[in-house]
Amino acid sequence: MALTPFGNFTLDWTAKPTKISGQATNFKTWLNTRTEDLKTYINDTLISALSATTDSASGADQIGATAISGWSGATVQAIMESAKADVDLKETIANVNEVKRRMLMGVSYFG
């Protein structure tokens, strides 16, 4: 799920009178619509997009990140995957080097 921009508020302030007189209840209602619009967007759209865990559509896939030298990706998810691949590669190299060391010493790696 991609992050969806907020869009427009329900209430268009430009259509309201420039001078409010004796309309306290209406004015409070107008102000509350703004907070309700924001709350609905945050709770129903933004939080669900950021907490998603579906592969290629997770919250981490939606958050941009500055490039890190040696790792690929422009999102948090892509950089984490690149870091994991780097760690796995280094672990594999370390295991291969240990096997080579044991072979040179005449020690069985497998037991």
Image (tube, rainbow, N blue to C red):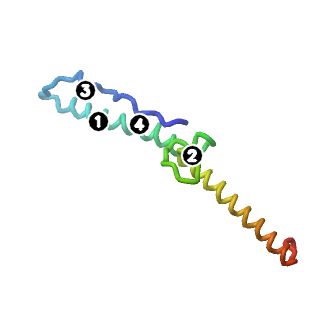
Classed neighbour count for the residue bearing mark 1: other residues with Cα under 10 Å, few (<14), some (14–19), many (≥20): few
Q: Residue at x 25, y 26 (%)?
A: 13
Relative vertical location of residue 40 with respect to residue 98 in this rendering, above or below: above
Residue type, label 2: Gly
Classed neighbour count for the residue bearing mark 3: other residues with Cα under 10 Å, few (<14), some (14–19), many (≥20): few
Residue underneath mark 1:
32
Q: Nearer the viewer, mark 2 or mark 4?
A: 2
Q: CA distance from mark 2 to mark 1?
A: 41 Å
Which of marks 3 and 4 precedes in the sequence?
3
Mark 2 in CB contact with mark 1 (< 8 angstroms): no
Q: Position of residue 1 (x, y in %)?
A: 55, 36
Residue underneath mark 3:
13
Residue type, label 1: Asn
Q: Position of residue 58 (x, y in %)?
A: 57, 43
Residue type, label 4: Thr
Residue underneath mark 2:
73
Element type where label 2 sits in the image? loop
Which of marks 3 and 1 precedes in the sequence?
3
Q: CA distance from mark 4 to mark 3?
A: 19 Å
- Residue that lies at the very extreme toward the front in this rendered image: 104
Mark 2 in CB contact with mark 3 (< 8 angstroms): no
Q: Residue at x 39, y 29 (%)?
A: 7
Q: CA distance from mark 1 to mark 3?
A: 13 Å
Q: CA distance from mark 1 to mark 4?
A: 12 Å
Which of marks 3 and 2 precedes in the sequence?
3
Place residue 25 in its image quadrant. top left
Q: Residue at x 40, y 33 (%)?
A: 6
- Left or right for 65, reference 53: left
Place residue 9 in its image quadrant. top left
